[in-house]
Image: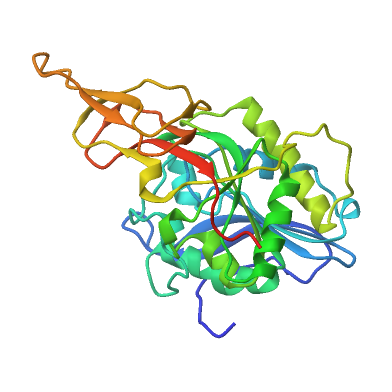
């Protein structure tokens, strides 16, 4: 590693067996002059095989991934695997403790800070440690997300775009192996500062998810996550495969078709959705309304879809401000897959 970091851990990444501990990042807020921000970390290693990073809690209000990774940390023993797992169940621990998308320490969204800064804020130091210390040790990266407090998203496995046909092929095969009900390409409108975009740049096979959300825990989504993590680890050869009922039979791959895939609130008010998540919609169809509850004489503002496709995501809180994402449409992916 060429870049200097003040973060440290007592875990030996090269040691066989099971280790549970923390990455400690020196942190000196008003309440604690010589304190630490602690990032939970587990490493399970046995024999020869690939190294897979399993990450949850990038956003602190997305719960399914951290729940499943906590189960793995407690229950998985070294003799059950071949290779090495680096498990980060609550990578953005300040945000996880607060149940917030962004860190209460510096207000930053971890998933918009990569490759990070070892001399930056706590969030920037976390992303720098992942980018410069963790990624170079690994072959694959599984990043478990949900919709968070503001969105409910259809449970799905996510393909991160990659620059070469070979990298795209590896990502697609791994995402399909996760075997979620939906498979969606998400490029975040070209955003390069996400954990998965940075993982692709580092040459890792990359798998993402969106598993429910709405600030709650869905038993169905937890089970999809639990089974999907096992499926993808079996795909990498770290765990033995086990029989599962087919879930994603047609293997159709969807994508969000740019800005037209989003229905955005033009004004502040209360959003009323008029279509159920999972429904097929068409451009020009009435999508919802924004109501002005303290001004009953003002009629609501109608919102319309700008694209055909599946209603993939829907805002959870009723209250909206200008620019809030209300609905998300995904349709047949038309970009490069091979």
The N terminus lies in quadrant: bottom right
Residue 167 relative to residue 79: left or right = left
Image point 57% across, 57% down: which residue?
160
What is the x, y in percent for residue 70? 67, 43
Q: Residue furthest bottom?
A: 2
Q: Residue furthest top?
A: 296
Residue 178 can be seen in this image: yes
What is the x, y in percent for residue 58? 51, 51
Image point 73% across, 69% down: which residue?
13
Quarter-of-image position of residue 261: top left
- With respect to residue 78, does 297 lie above or below? above
Count of numbered tags: 0
What is the x, y in percent for residue 147? 48, 38
The C terminus lies in quadrant: bottom right
Image point 70% across, 62% down: which residue?
169
- With respect to residue 253, does 243 lie above or below? above
Residue 171 relative to residue 280: left or right = right
Residue 156 relative to residue 193: left or right = right
Q: Nearer the viewer, residue 98 or 147?
A: 147
Residue 103 can be seen in this image: no
Residue 214 relative to residue 250: left or right = left
Q: Nearer the viewer, residue 189 or 229?
A: 189
Image point 62% across, 49% down: which residue?
89
Quarter-of-image position of residue 219: top right
């Amino acid at each position: 590693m060429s870049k200097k970091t003040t973060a440290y851990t007592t875990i030996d990444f090269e040691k066989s067996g099971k280790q549970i501990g923390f990455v400690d990042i020196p942190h000196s807020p008003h309440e604690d002059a010589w304190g630490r921000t602690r990032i939970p970390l587990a490493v399970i290693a046995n024999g020869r095989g690939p190294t897979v990073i399993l990450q949850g809690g990038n956003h602190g209000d997305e719960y399914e991934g951290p729940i499943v990774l906590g189960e793995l940390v407690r229950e998985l023993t070294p003799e059950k695997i071949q290779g090495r797992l680096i498990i980060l169940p609550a990578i953005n621990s300040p945000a996880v403790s607060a149940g917030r998308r962004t860190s209460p320490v510096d207000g930053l969204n971890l998933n918009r800070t990569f490759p990070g800064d070892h001399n930056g804020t706590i969030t920037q130091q976390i992303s720098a440690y992942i980018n410069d210390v963790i990624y170079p040790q690994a072959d694959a990266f599984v990043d478990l997300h949900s919709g968070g407090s503001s969105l409910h998203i259809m449970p799905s496995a996510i393909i991160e775009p990659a620059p070469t046909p070979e990298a795209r092929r590896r990502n697609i095969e791994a995402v399909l192996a996760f075997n979620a009900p939906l498979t969606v390409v998400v490029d975040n409108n070209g955003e390069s500062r996400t954990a998965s975009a940075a993982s692709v740049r580092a040459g890792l096979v990359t798998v993402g998810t969106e598993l429910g959300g709405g600030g709650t825990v869905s038993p169905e989504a937890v089970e999809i996550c639990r089974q999907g993590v096992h499926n993808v680890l079996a795909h990498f050869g770290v765990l033995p495969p086990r029989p599962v009922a087919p879930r994603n039979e047609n293997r159709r791959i969807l994508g969000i078709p740019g800005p037209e895939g989003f229905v955005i609130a033009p004004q502040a008010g209360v959003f009323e959705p008029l279509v159920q998540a999972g429904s097929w919609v068409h451009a020009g169809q009435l999508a919802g309304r924004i109501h002005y509850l303290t001004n009953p004489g003002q009629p609501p503002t109608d919102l319309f879809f700008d694209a055909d496709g599946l209603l993939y995501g829907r805002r959870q809180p009723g209250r909206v401000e200008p620019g809030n994402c209300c609905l998300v449409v995904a349709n047949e992916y038309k970009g490069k897959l091979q």
